[in-house]
Image (spheres, rainbow, N blue to C red):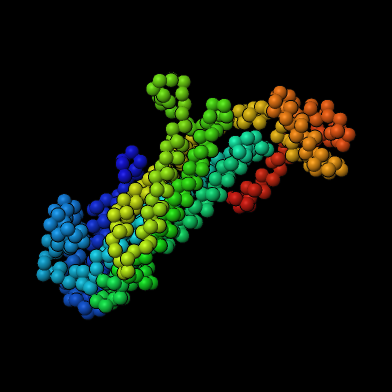
Protein backbone atom coordinates (compact mmCIF):
# COMPACT_ATOMS: atom_id res chain seq x y z
CA UNK A 1 0.00 0.00 0.00
CA UNK A 2 1.28 3.48 -0.79
CA UNK A 3 2.56 5.47 2.23
CA UNK A 4 0.04 8.28 1.62
CA UNK A 5 -2.79 6.08 2.92
CA UNK A 6 -0.87 4.04 5.49
CA UNK A 7 -0.31 4.13 9.23
CA UNK A 8 2.79 2.54 10.75
CA UNK A 9 1.24 0.03 13.19
CA UNK A 10 -0.86 -1.63 10.50
CA UNK A 11 1.95 -1.49 7.95
CA UNK A 12 4.26 -3.25 10.42
CA UNK A 13 1.96 -6.28 10.51
CA UNK A 14 2.58 -6.86 6.81
CA UNK A 15 6.31 -6.19 6.69
CA UNK A 16 8.36 -9.18 5.43
CA UNK A 17 10.33 -9.13 8.68
CA UNK A 18 7.11 -9.59 10.66
CA UNK A 19 6.02 -12.44 8.42
CA UNK A 20 9.32 -14.27 8.82
CA UNK A 21 9.22 -13.75 12.60
CA UNK A 22 5.79 -15.44 12.69
CA UNK A 23 7.05 -18.24 10.45
CA UNK A 24 9.90 -18.79 12.88
CA UNK A 25 7.55 -18.94 15.86
CA UNK A 26 5.34 -21.49 14.10
CA UNK A 27 8.31 -23.71 13.33
CA UNK A 28 9.88 -23.30 16.78
CA UNK A 29 6.66 -24.01 18.67
CA UNK A 30 6.04 -27.03 16.43
CA UNK A 31 9.50 -28.36 17.33
CA UNK A 32 8.72 -27.91 21.03
CA UNK A 33 5.50 -29.86 20.63
CA UNK A 34 7.22 -32.66 18.73
CA UNK A 35 9.92 -32.84 21.41
CA UNK A 36 7.18 -33.13 24.05
CA UNK A 37 5.85 -36.12 22.11
CA UNK A 38 9.32 -37.65 21.79
CA UNK A 39 9.25 -37.36 18.02
CA UNK A 40 12.42 -35.26 17.85
CA UNK A 41 15.27 -34.79 20.33
CA UNK A 42 14.72 -32.06 22.94
CA UNK A 43 18.12 -30.52 22.21
CA UNK A 44 17.19 -30.01 18.54
CA UNK A 45 14.00 -28.20 19.53
CA UNK A 46 15.92 -26.02 21.95
CA UNK A 47 18.55 -25.26 19.32
CA UNK A 48 15.92 -23.72 17.05
CA UNK A 49 15.25 -21.06 19.66
CA UNK A 50 18.82 -19.80 19.20
CA UNK A 51 17.29 -17.73 16.41
CA UNK A 52 14.63 -16.11 18.61
CA UNK A 53 16.43 -12.76 18.65
CA UNK A 54 17.69 -12.93 15.10
CA UNK A 55 16.60 -10.29 12.60
CA UNK A 56 16.05 -12.44 9.57
CA UNK A 57 17.76 -11.09 6.47
CA UNK A 58 14.96 -10.45 3.99
CA UNK A 59 17.40 -9.85 1.16
CA UNK A 60 19.16 -13.15 1.90
CA UNK A 61 15.86 -15.04 1.89
CA UNK A 62 14.94 -13.41 -1.42
CA UNK A 63 18.33 -14.44 -2.78
CA UNK A 64 17.74 -18.08 -1.81
CA UNK A 65 14.21 -18.00 -3.18
CA UNK A 66 15.55 -16.79 -6.53
CA UNK A 67 17.20 -20.21 -6.76
CA UNK A 68 14.67 -22.47 -5.03
CA UNK A 69 11.58 -20.71 -6.42
CA UNK A 70 9.93 -21.56 -3.08
CA UNK A 71 9.50 -19.02 -0.31
CA UNK A 72 9.12 -21.39 2.64
CA UNK A 73 12.13 -23.49 1.61
CA UNK A 74 14.13 -20.28 1.23
CA UNK A 75 13.21 -19.28 4.76
CA UNK A 76 14.02 -22.72 6.20
CA UNK A 77 17.40 -22.64 4.48
CA UNK A 78 18.12 -19.23 5.99
CA UNK A 79 16.97 -20.43 9.40
CA UNK A 80 19.41 -23.33 9.19
CA UNK A 81 22.18 -20.82 8.49
CA UNK A 82 21.53 -19.35 11.94
CA UNK A 83 20.70 -22.52 13.86
CA UNK A 84 23.06 -24.97 12.15
CA UNK A 85 22.08 -27.55 9.58
CA UNK A 86 22.44 -30.50 11.99
CA UNK A 87 20.46 -28.78 14.74
CA UNK A 88 17.75 -27.67 12.28
CA UNK A 89 17.27 -31.02 10.57
CA UNK A 90 13.97 -31.70 12.34
CA UNK A 91 12.48 -28.29 11.60
CA UNK A 92 9.26 -28.54 9.52
CA UNK A 93 8.99 -32.26 10.36
CA UNK A 94 5.75 -33.63 8.90
CA UNK A 95 4.57 -30.15 7.95
CA UNK A 96 3.64 -28.63 4.61
CA UNK A 97 4.17 -25.07 3.43
CA UNK A 98 0.52 -24.14 3.88
CA UNK A 99 0.76 -25.02 7.56
CA UNK A 100 3.16 -22.11 7.86
CA UNK A 101 1.64 -19.78 5.28
CA UNK A 102 -1.99 -20.09 6.32
CA UNK A 103 -1.36 -20.02 10.04
CA UNK A 104 0.83 -16.95 9.60
CA UNK A 105 -1.74 -15.21 7.40
CA UNK A 106 -4.40 -15.73 10.03
CA UNK A 107 -2.12 -14.40 12.76
CA UNK A 108 -1.61 -11.28 10.66
CA UNK A 109 -5.33 -10.91 10.01
CA UNK A 110 -6.17 -11.25 13.70
CA UNK A 111 -3.59 -8.60 14.56
CA UNK A 112 -5.02 -6.38 11.86
CA UNK A 113 -8.51 -6.99 13.22
CA UNK A 114 -7.36 -5.92 16.68
CA UNK A 115 -6.20 -2.58 15.27
CA UNK A 116 -9.42 -2.15 13.31
CA UNK A 117 -11.49 -2.85 16.44
CA UNK A 118 -9.53 -0.12 18.24
CA UNK A 119 -10.11 2.21 15.26
CA UNK A 120 -13.86 1.62 15.34
CA UNK A 121 -13.97 2.17 19.09
CA UNK A 122 -12.25 5.55 18.64
CA UNK A 123 -14.72 6.51 15.91
CA UNK A 124 -17.63 5.49 18.14
CA UNK A 125 -16.35 7.74 20.91
CA UNK A 126 -16.19 10.70 18.52
CA UNK A 127 -19.66 10.03 17.13
CA UNK A 128 -21.16 9.71 20.60
CA UNK A 129 -19.60 12.98 21.75
CA UNK A 130 -20.93 14.89 18.74
CA UNK A 131 -24.35 13.21 19.04
CA UNK A 132 -24.75 14.36 22.63
CA UNK A 133 -23.42 17.81 21.77
CA UNK A 134 -26.04 18.27 19.04
CA UNK A 135 -28.88 16.15 20.41
CA UNK A 136 -31.32 19.06 20.15
CA UNK A 137 -29.81 20.89 17.16
CA UNK A 138 -32.74 20.84 14.75
CA UNK A 139 -32.16 20.29 11.04
CA UNK A 140 -34.31 19.19 8.16
CA UNK A 141 -34.45 15.51 7.35
CA UNK A 142 -34.34 14.69 3.67
CA UNK A 143 -35.58 11.82 1.55
CA UNK A 144 -34.54 11.59 -2.09
CA UNK A 145 -32.46 14.69 -1.32
CA UNK A 146 -35.69 16.67 -0.81
CA UNK A 147 -36.91 18.31 2.41
CA UNK A 148 -38.98 15.82 4.40
CA UNK A 149 -39.56 16.52 8.12
CA UNK A 150 -37.46 17.96 10.97
CA UNK A 151 -34.89 15.82 12.76
CA UNK A 152 -31.79 16.74 14.76
CA UNK A 153 -28.08 16.71 14.06
CA UNK A 154 -27.70 14.59 17.17
CA UNK A 155 -29.92 11.92 15.66
CA UNK A 156 -27.78 11.95 12.53
CA UNK A 157 -24.65 11.29 14.57
CA UNK A 158 -26.52 8.71 16.68
CA UNK A 159 -27.62 6.89 13.55
CA UNK A 160 -24.02 6.63 12.41
CA UNK A 161 -22.99 5.55 15.91
CA UNK A 162 -25.50 2.69 15.86
CA UNK A 163 -24.28 1.61 12.42
CA UNK A 164 -20.64 1.63 13.53
CA UNK A 165 -21.55 -0.19 16.73
CA UNK A 166 -22.95 -2.99 14.58
CA UNK A 167 -19.71 -2.91 12.63
CA UNK A 168 -17.76 -3.29 15.85
CA UNK A 169 -19.66 -6.51 16.55
CA UNK A 170 -19.10 -7.67 12.98
CA UNK A 171 -15.38 -6.95 13.22
CA UNK A 172 -15.06 -8.87 16.47
CA UNK A 173 -16.96 -11.79 14.96
CA UNK A 174 -14.75 -11.69 11.87
CA UNK A 175 -11.66 -11.75 14.06
CA UNK A 176 -12.97 -14.78 15.93
CA UNK A 177 -13.74 -16.60 12.68
CA UNK A 178 -10.32 -15.97 11.18
CA UNK A 179 -8.36 -16.86 14.32
CA UNK A 180 -7.67 -20.48 13.37
CA UNK A 181 -4.46 -22.30 12.56
CA UNK A 182 -3.58 -25.53 10.79
CA UNK A 183 -0.52 -27.73 11.33
CA UNK A 184 -1.99 -30.85 9.75
CA UNK A 185 0.41 -31.91 7.01
CA UNK A 186 0.22 -32.46 3.28
CA UNK A 187 -3.53 -32.92 2.78
CA UNK A 188 -4.73 -32.21 6.30
CA UNK A 189 -4.81 -35.82 7.54
CA UNK A 190 -2.09 -35.53 10.24
CA UNK A 191 -0.46 -38.60 8.68
CA UNK A 192 3.04 -37.36 9.47
CA UNK A 193 2.39 -35.03 12.39
CA UNK A 194 0.40 -35.44 15.58
CA UNK A 195 -2.71 -33.22 16.10
CA UNK A 196 -1.19 -32.28 19.46
CA UNK A 197 1.43 -30.28 17.57
CA UNK A 198 -1.28 -28.19 15.95
CA UNK A 199 -2.96 -27.64 19.30
CA UNK A 200 0.31 -26.52 20.89
CA UNK A 201 1.23 -24.10 18.09
CA UNK A 202 -2.25 -22.58 17.95
CA UNK A 203 -2.30 -22.10 21.71
CA UNK A 204 1.04 -20.29 21.63
CA UNK A 205 -0.11 -18.02 18.79
CA UNK A 206 -3.54 -17.20 20.22
CA UNK A 207 -5.43 -19.25 17.64
CA UNK A 208 -7.70 -22.27 17.75
CA UNK A 209 -7.10 -25.39 15.64
CA UNK A 210 -8.98 -25.48 12.35
CA UNK A 211 -11.51 -28.33 12.85
CA UNK A 212 -10.81 -29.77 9.42
CA UNK A 213 -8.33 -28.38 6.95
CA UNK A 214 -7.31 -29.84 3.64
CA UNK A 215 -3.86 -28.61 2.79
CA UNK A 216 -5.19 -25.12 3.47
CA UNK A 217 -7.47 -23.39 5.94
CA UNK A 218 -10.92 -23.11 4.30
CA UNK A 219 -11.27 -19.79 2.49
CA UNK A 220 -14.88 -19.17 3.42
CA UNK A 221 -13.42 -17.80 6.65
CA UNK A 222 -11.36 -15.28 4.73
CA UNK A 223 -14.28 -14.40 2.49
CA UNK A 224 -16.32 -13.54 5.57
CA UNK A 225 -13.43 -11.49 6.96
CA UNK A 226 -12.96 -9.39 3.85
CA UNK A 227 -16.72 -9.04 3.40
CA UNK A 228 -16.79 -7.52 6.87
CA UNK A 229 -14.06 -5.07 5.87
CA UNK A 230 -16.23 -4.16 2.88
CA UNK A 231 -19.26 -3.50 5.07
CA UNK A 232 -17.24 -1.32 7.44
CA UNK A 233 -15.84 0.60 4.48
CA UNK A 234 -19.35 1.13 3.15
CA UNK A 235 -20.37 2.61 6.49
CA UNK A 236 -17.36 4.92 6.33
CA UNK A 237 -18.58 6.06 2.93
CA UNK A 238 -22.14 6.47 4.22
CA UNK A 239 -20.96 8.96 6.84
CA UNK A 240 -18.60 10.67 4.40
CA UNK A 241 -21.38 11.18 1.84
CA UNK A 242 -23.58 12.89 4.44
CA UNK A 243 -20.77 15.27 5.39
CA UNK A 244 -20.03 16.01 1.73
CA UNK A 245 -23.69 16.85 1.20
CA UNK A 246 -23.77 19.11 4.25
CA UNK A 247 -20.72 21.04 3.00
CA UNK A 248 -22.28 21.93 -0.35
CA UNK A 249 -22.45 25.72 -0.68
CA UNK A 250 -26.24 25.80 -0.99
CA UNK A 251 -26.60 23.56 2.08
CA UNK A 252 -23.66 24.38 4.39
CA UNK A 253 -25.04 22.75 7.51
CA UNK A 254 -21.70 21.22 8.40
CA UNK A 255 -18.17 21.13 7.04
CA UNK A 256 -14.76 19.60 7.41
CA UNK A 257 -12.38 21.67 9.51
CA UNK A 258 -10.30 23.98 7.28
CA UNK A 259 -6.88 24.55 8.82
CA UNK A 260 -4.79 27.71 8.76
CA UNK A 261 -2.78 27.80 5.56
CA UNK A 262 -4.90 25.15 3.85
CA UNK A 263 -5.73 25.80 0.19
CA UNK A 264 -8.88 24.57 -1.52
CA UNK A 265 -8.07 25.20 -5.15
CA UNK A 266 -5.07 26.14 -7.25
CA UNK A 267 -7.31 28.37 -9.36
CA UNK A 268 -10.04 29.67 -7.00
CA UNK A 269 -8.83 31.05 -3.65
CA UNK A 270 -12.35 31.08 -2.19
CA UNK A 271 -12.74 27.29 -2.29
CA UNK A 272 -13.19 25.08 0.78
CA UNK A 273 -13.60 21.57 -0.58
CA UNK A 274 -14.61 18.41 1.34
CA UNK A 275 -11.39 16.70 0.30
CA UNK A 276 -11.09 14.35 3.27
CA UNK A 277 -14.57 12.87 2.92
CA UNK A 278 -14.21 12.66 -0.85
CA UNK A 279 -11.00 10.76 -0.20
CA UNK A 280 -12.86 8.45 2.17
CA UNK A 281 -15.38 7.65 -0.56
CA UNK A 282 -12.52 6.58 -2.82
CA UNK A 283 -10.78 4.57 -0.11
CA UNK A 284 -14.03 2.72 0.64
CA UNK A 285 -14.17 1.65 -3.00
CA UNK A 286 -10.68 0.22 -2.74
CA UNK A 287 -11.49 -1.78 0.39
CA UNK A 288 -14.62 -3.18 -1.24
CA UNK A 289 -12.58 -4.17 -4.29
CA UNK A 290 -11.03 -6.90 -2.12
CA UNK A 291 -14.36 -8.56 -1.37
CA UNK A 292 -15.10 -10.27 -4.70
CA UNK A 293 -11.59 -11.78 -5.05
CA UNK A 294 -11.86 -13.07 -1.47
CA UNK A 295 -15.20 -14.70 -2.36
CA UNK A 296 -13.69 -16.24 -5.46
CA UNK A 297 -10.85 -17.70 -3.38
CA UNK A 298 -13.29 -20.04 -1.62
CA UNK A 299 -13.43 -22.48 -4.54
CA UNK A 300 -10.11 -24.34 -4.75
CA UNK A 301 -9.23 -27.57 -6.55
CA UNK A 302 -9.45 -30.71 -4.43
CA UNK A 303 -7.34 -30.42 -1.26
CA UNK A 304 -5.66 -27.23 -2.48
CA UNK A 305 -4.34 -25.08 -5.27
CA UNK A 306 -2.61 -21.70 -5.07
CA UNK A 307 -5.01 -19.56 -7.07
CA UNK A 308 -5.84 -17.79 -3.80
CA UNK A 309 -2.23 -17.04 -2.92
CA UNK A 310 -1.45 -14.12 -5.23
CA UNK A 311 -4.81 -12.55 -4.38
CA UNK A 312 -4.19 -12.67 -0.64
CA UNK A 313 -0.67 -11.29 -0.92
CA UNK A 314 -2.32 -8.13 -2.24
CA UNK A 315 -5.70 -7.86 -0.54
CA UNK A 316 -4.44 -8.79 2.93
CA UNK A 317 -2.21 -5.76 3.40
CA UNK A 318 -4.02 -3.41 1.03
CA UNK A 319 -7.53 -3.80 2.46
CA UNK A 320 -6.53 -3.71 6.13
CA UNK A 321 -4.05 -0.83 5.74
CA UNK A 322 -6.55 1.21 3.73
CA UNK A 323 -9.43 0.63 6.14
CA UNK A 324 -7.23 1.42 9.14
CA UNK A 325 -6.28 4.73 7.53
CA UNK A 326 -9.87 5.50 6.53
CA UNK A 327 -11.28 4.89 10.00
CA UNK A 328 -8.63 7.10 11.60
CA UNK A 329 -9.23 9.84 9.02
CA UNK A 330 -12.99 9.72 9.57
CA UNK A 331 -12.52 9.94 13.34
CA UNK A 332 -10.48 13.10 12.82
CA UNK A 333 -13.14 14.57 10.54
CA UNK A 334 -15.90 13.90 13.09
CA UNK A 335 -13.83 15.29 15.97
CA UNK A 336 -13.16 18.60 14.22
CA UNK A 337 -16.30 18.88 12.12
CA UNK A 338 -17.91 22.32 12.00
CA UNK A 339 -21.68 22.50 12.57
CA UNK A 340 -23.84 25.47 11.52
CA UNK A 341 -27.20 25.41 13.40
CA UNK A 342 -28.36 28.75 12.00
CA UNK A 343 -27.97 27.48 8.46
CA UNK A 344 -29.94 24.37 9.39
CA UNK A 345 -32.90 26.50 10.50
CA UNK A 346 -32.59 28.75 7.46
CA UNK A 347 -32.63 25.74 5.14
CA UNK A 348 -35.64 24.25 6.90
CA UNK A 349 -37.56 27.51 6.47
CA UNK A 350 -36.58 28.01 2.84
CA UNK A 351 -40.14 27.01 1.96
CA UNK A 352 -41.91 28.43 5.02
CA UNK A 353 -43.83 25.83 6.99
CA UNK A 354 -43.90 23.33 4.14
CA UNK A 355 -42.31 20.53 6.18
CA UNK A 356 -45.37 20.41 8.45
CA UNK A 357 -47.63 19.07 5.70
CA UNK A 358 -48.10 15.62 7.23
CA UNK A 359 -49.30 17.06 10.52
CA UNK A 360 -51.99 19.03 8.71
CA UNK A 361 -52.96 15.99 6.62
CA UNK A 362 -53.41 13.88 9.75
CA UNK A 363 -55.33 16.63 11.53
CA UNK A 364 -57.77 16.89 8.64
CA UNK A 365 -58.43 13.14 8.64
CA UNK A 366 -58.93 13.22 12.40
CA UNK A 367 -61.41 16.05 11.88
CA UNK A 368 -63.54 13.85 9.63
CA UNK A 369 -62.18 14.66 6.16
CA UNK A 370 -61.49 11.63 3.95
CA UNK A 371 -57.82 10.90 3.38
CA UNK A 372 -58.18 11.49 -0.36
CA UNK A 373 -59.75 14.91 0.13
CA UNK A 374 -57.34 15.83 2.92
CA UNK A 375 -54.37 14.96 0.73
CA UNK A 376 -55.79 17.09 -2.08
CA UNK A 377 -56.32 20.11 0.22
CA UNK A 378 -52.82 19.92 1.66
CA UNK A 379 -51.03 19.22 -1.60
CA UNK A 380 -52.62 22.07 -3.54
CA UNK A 381 -51.46 24.52 -0.90
CA UNK A 382 -48.03 22.91 -0.68
CA UNK A 383 -47.57 23.29 -4.44
CA UNK A 384 -48.19 27.04 -4.13
CA UNK A 385 -45.34 27.21 -1.63
CA UNK A 386 -43.07 25.23 -3.98
CA UNK A 387 -43.87 27.49 -6.90
CA UNK A 388 -44.14 30.92 -5.27
CA UNK A 389 -42.26 30.64 -1.95
CA UNK A 390 -45.35 31.72 -0.03
CA UNK A 391 -46.05 30.77 3.58
CA UNK A 392 -47.68 27.35 3.92
CA UNK A 393 -49.62 28.25 7.05
CA UNK A 394 -51.03 31.39 5.42
CA UNK A 395 -52.09 29.40 2.38
CA UNK A 396 -53.92 26.91 4.60
CA UNK A 397 -55.67 29.68 6.51
CA UNK A 398 -56.89 31.07 3.20
CA UNK A 399 -58.26 27.71 2.00
CA UNK A 400 -61.99 27.42 2.67
CA UNK A 401 -61.98 23.62 2.68
CA UNK A 402 -59.20 23.51 5.26
CA UNK A 403 -60.69 26.10 7.63
CA UNK A 404 -64.04 24.40 7.36
CA UNK A 405 -62.47 21.40 9.11
CA UNK A 406 -59.82 23.06 11.30
CA UNK A 407 -59.92 26.28 13.29
CA UNK A 408 -57.07 28.80 12.93
CA UNK A 409 -55.85 27.75 16.37
CA UNK A 410 -55.80 24.12 15.35
CA UNK A 411 -53.86 24.97 12.20
CA UNK A 412 -51.39 27.09 14.18
CA UNK A 413 -50.78 24.20 16.59
CA UNK A 414 -49.55 22.02 13.74
CA UNK A 415 -46.48 24.21 13.25
CA UNK A 416 -44.84 23.46 16.59
CA UNK A 417 -41.24 22.37 15.89
CA UNK A 418 -40.94 20.60 19.22
CA UNK A 419 -43.50 18.05 18.08
CA UNK A 420 -40.85 16.45 15.89
CA UNK A 421 -38.18 16.17 18.58
CA UNK A 422 -40.27 14.88 21.50
CA UNK A 423 -38.89 11.34 21.25
CA UNK A 424 -35.23 12.20 20.79
CA UNK A 425 -34.44 11.13 24.36
CA UNK A 426 -36.14 7.78 23.76
CA UNK A 427 -34.07 7.17 20.63
CA UNK A 428 -30.86 8.20 22.42
CA UNK A 429 -31.64 5.75 25.23
CA UNK A 430 -32.04 2.99 22.66
CA UNK A 431 -28.71 3.82 21.01
CA UNK A 432 -26.54 4.79 23.97
CA UNK A 433 -28.34 3.21 26.92
CA UNK A 434 -30.38 4.83 29.65
CA UNK A 435 -27.41 6.76 31.03
Q: Is residue 75 visible?
A: no
Q: Is residue 255 above or below residue 60?
A: above
Report the front residue among 424 and 371. Answer: 371
Q: Is residue 190 visible?
A: yes
Q: Is residue 55 above or below residue 341?
A: below
Q: Position of residue 202 (x, y in %)?
A: 33, 68
Q: Position of residue 18 (x, y in %)?
A: 26, 54
The extreme right residue here reads 404
Q: Position of residue 47 (x, y in %)?
A: 16, 68
Image quarter in which the N terminus is found: top left
The quadrant in which residue 389 appears is top right
Q: Is residue 35 above or below residue 105?
A: below
Horizontal arrangement in the rendering, residue 301 relative to residue 339 (left or right):
left
Q: Residue at x 60, y 36 (%)?
A: 145
The quadrant in which residue 129 appears is top right
Horizontal arrangement in the rendering, residue 29 relative to residue 371 (left or right):
left
Q: Residue at x 44, y 54 (%)?
A: 227
Q: Position of residue 231 (x, y in %)?
A: 47, 51
Horizontal arrangement in the rendering, residue 39 relative to residue 230 (left or right):
left
Q: Residue at x 63, y 29 (%)?
A: 347
Amino acid sequence: MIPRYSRPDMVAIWEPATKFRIWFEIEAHACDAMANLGVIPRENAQAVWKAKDVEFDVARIDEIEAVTKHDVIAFLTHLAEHVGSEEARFVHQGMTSSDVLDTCFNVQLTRAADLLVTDIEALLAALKRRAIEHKDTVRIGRSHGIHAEPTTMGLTFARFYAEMDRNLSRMRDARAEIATGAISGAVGTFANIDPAVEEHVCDKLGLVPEPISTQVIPRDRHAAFFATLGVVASSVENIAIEIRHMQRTEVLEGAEFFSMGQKGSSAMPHKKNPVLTENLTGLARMVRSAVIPAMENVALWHERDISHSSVERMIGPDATITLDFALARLTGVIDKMLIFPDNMLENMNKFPGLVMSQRVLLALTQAGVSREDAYTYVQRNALKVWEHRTDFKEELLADADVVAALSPEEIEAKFDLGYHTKHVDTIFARVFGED
